[in-house]
Amino acid sequence: MKMLPRQQTAQQQQTQCKNLDFRKRQIDTLKVFNDNVVEVTEQEEYCIHFETSGRTLVLTVQLGVNFPNERPKIVISPTVQHHWVNAATGEVETAPGLLNYSPHSDLGRVVQAIIREFERFPPPIVNSGSPINIPTRAGNANATATPTSIAAKSLDSSNENSPLDSSKSCKLNESSLPNLSTLSLDELKQLDSDPQFFDDFIEEMSVVQHLNEELDSMINQVEIISRENESKETHLVELKRKLSDDVTALKNLGEKCDQLNKKYLKKSEEYAPQHIRVNNCYFLYTLNSAYLVYHGSLENSERNN
């Protein structure tokens, strides 16, 4: 009864060590798949700064006590307008990697996918009241930028995207939707009311066209790979048939080898030196017996004569 608590303690320690190793591996993936990773609190909080459309954003990754059994908390600063982000808290909540998160997910890939989304589709900033402060730790090889320079960039980008500055806001809209600047007021109203006109406008956007080109390229690659697989199918079937024939031939050779081996063992016993000596002795004995019988018969016949 006294040993039970000790056994439980040992099991708990083993589980904690396992979780700690898994936690370290997840943090390693964060540093492998992402640049500019800054450690704020060891094994608990990390910051990754990146640039999108001339602005500097920061993702703060917070690892709870139960991580990796529970998903990490990821907050973007400054808060941006995006369907993945909670506008009130700045927390990234509905990214696919977080929604499908499991203990076997790679933390680094989850964060990398979020950063790529914001880089490809720069979101507008919701709150821009203060510059971004990125903590640094001495000796951290991943912290390649200084806090002063990052804060300065953040301040500039915050001022550019302030709701009070309409000219800067127009520049942001033009960079995100450059075709809007060429539309008249009537066309803008039609864009808002006519779904077909809206769909056509979206299709003509450079970002959408680029995505369509990538999609077409991927479809072509899939078709090429599919044709290659079909062309190799006949060859694979032929190889499979040949392999089956070789296996059958090998099986027959094995059976023949067993038969020859039995014959060899039998002949080896017959022609063994000691076996030959016994056979010779038996032959001489038989010859001598026949010779004695012959001489006895010869003497009897002479006596009778």
Image (cartoon, rainbow, N blue to C red):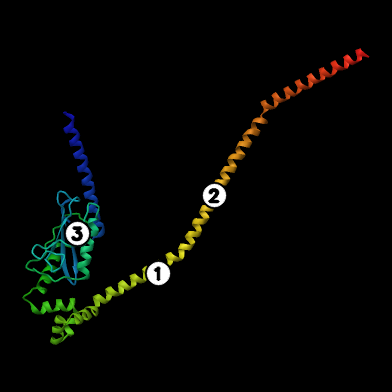
Task: Quote the CA–CA distance across marks 1 and 3.
Answer: 33 Å
- 302 lies above or below 209: above
The numbered dot on residue 87 is none
For residue 49, side relative to residue 217 (left or right)? left
Classify mark 2: helix, strand or loop: helix
Looking at the rendering, which quadrant does residue 302 occupy? top right
Classify mark 3: helix, strand or loop: helix
Which residue sits at x=63%, y=33%? 266
Q: Earlier in the sequence, mark 1 or mark 2?
A: 1
Kind of residue at disc 2: Thr
Picture coordinates of residue 155, whole percent (x, y): 10, 69
Q: Which residue is mark 1?
A: 224
Q: Which residue is mark 2?
A: 248
Kind of residue at disc 1: Ile
- 271 lies above or below 95: above
Q: Earlier in the sequence, mark 3 or mark 2?
A: 3
The numbered dot on residue 99 is 3
Picture coordinates of residue 292, whole percent (x, y): 82, 17
Task: Quote the CA–CA distance across marks 1 and 2.
Answer: 36 Å
Looking at the rendering, which quadrant does residue 269 occupy? top right
Asked whether the residues under the numbered discs 3 and 2 touch, taking CB atoms below 8 Å apart as contact, a structural biologist would say no
Residue 102 visible in rendering: yes
Q: Earlier in the sequence, mark 1 or mark 3?
A: 3
Kind of residue at disc 3: Leu
- 261 lies above or below 293: below
Task: Quote the CA–CA distance across marks 3 and 2.
Answer: 53 Å
Residue furthest to the top: 303
